[in-house]
Image: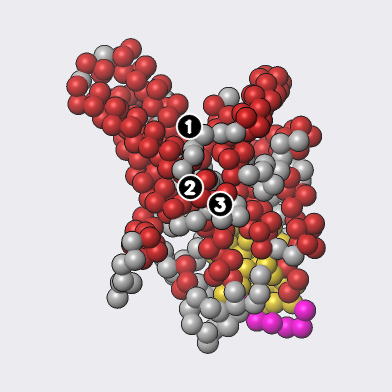
Amino acid sequence: MDLSYTPEEEEFRAHLREWLGKVLPTLPPKPSPDDWPGRRAYDLGWQRMLYDAGYADVHWEGTPSVRLIFLEETERAGAPYVGANFVGLLHAGPTIAAEGTPEQRARWLPPVLRGEEVWCQGFSEPDAGSDLAALRTRARRDGDDYVVSGSKIWTSHAEVADWCELLVRTDPDAPRHRGISWLALPMDAPGVTVRPLRTLAGSAEFAEVFLDDVRVPVANRVGDENDGWRVTMVTLSFERGTAFVGEVVACRRVLGELAVTARRNGRWDDPALRRRLGRLNAEFRALWRLTQWNVSEAEASGGVPGVGGSVFKLRYSHARQELYDAAAEVLGADSLDLERPWVLDRLSSLSYTIAAGTSQIQRNIVGERILGLPKGR
């Protein structure tokens, strides 16, 4: 398989790199991590700059290789991450682009690209744990609306979102995976209550969302009624397949910074630490190659990442945790200082083996869909 880039793709890289070099010095200071309205405005302002420069649609209209180059170059240049709108740009947007009607694409995609609307993800539920198919949020059909009742948890950026990609059970009598539908929920609809959750790192980018007889138009359903599980697999393939690409580049950068810091503070003299950093370097190089392979597979299958994303997600989650454990070893006692670099990243890394599907779920997917092993009982 050819993992190299075409001359046209390298030309795209060169133009993007030149543009980033010009605009990044002009950006205003980033808001405080706890100022989510400010962060929303900052992130959407950056998205508008991308839109005006013609780079806003690479996540949906560009080939997977172009997406890879875009994420690689923006991370290397230290450009703002998608931030508050990562669900809209990396999850909901690509799903609507792949599965939505022309009317749905025309309604929801341009505002995301222009930096006008933010999405959140309403998948997980308090009583379902890692079993997404066990969701209980109900959607009862009433004329041209669904009447939705239930609750969601770990809903990213719900407090500043305009829309939510929402999974609901539309047929309680159907088999678990066949009675689910994928809806676009307006967050300002009557009956929607958002309660932010504070994380171990002290931030509040997650929330509980309570739905009390919320009316959602049937026209807001993406895909057929009761076909939401298949649509959700499209969403999760993007979430696990390409959404973490920029973070792999970031981890490789952090690894280099750790080596520099270790040389300065004397910890480089520890051969065990040097071996650990060397192994992590090999790990992230391999993950980058796996990412390129997954992207090549996606190009061959119409642009939607396949189950190889689960292999990547599984290993990347653990490699990230190992990286920041190594950072704590390099920092020593300073690893308890929340003001030091990498300390908050270490706390947030603990969530990666749970977010976007737990490692146990990823192992099941790899075992059943790639290795052909029988389903567990």
Look at label 2 and name its amino acid.
Answer: Asn
Q: Is residue 148 magenta?
A: no
Q: Residue furthest front?
A: 1
Q: Nearer the viewer, residue 151 or 236?
A: 236
Spot occupied by residue 15 in the image (x, y as percentages of width and height): 69, 25
From the top left corner, tell me how far across and down residue 264 is, in percent. Answer: 33, 12
Q: Which residue is the site of mark 3?
A: 300
Res 1 seen here: yes
- Identify the residue shown where x is 60% and y is 77%: 226
Q: Badges 3 and 1: C-beta atoms under 8 Å apart?
A: no
Decide which of tag 2 and tag 1 comes sooner along the chain. Answer: 1
Q: Nearer the viewer, residue 198 or 292?
A: 292
Q: CA distance from mark 2 to mark 3?
A: 10 Å
Label 3, label 1: how far apart the Cα atoms are = 27 Å
Q: Residues within 10 Å of mark 2 (few under 14, many from 20)?
A: many
User: Helix, strand or loop at disc 2?
Assistant: helix
Question: Judging from the image, what secondary structure is the residue with disc 3 in?
Answer: helix
Task: Point out the frontmost of discs 2 and 3.
Answer: 3
- Give the class, few, some or many, for how many residues have Cα within 10 Å of label 3's Cα (few <14, many ≥20): few
**What residue appears at the point 66 percent right and 53 percent down from the top-left corner?**
93
Residue under the image location 38 percent in, 60 percent down: 370
Residue neighbourhood size for the residue with mark 1, other residues' Cα within 10 Å, grouped as few (<14), some (14–19), many (≥20): some
- What residue would you read off at disc 1? 250
- Magenta segment, which residues? 138-144
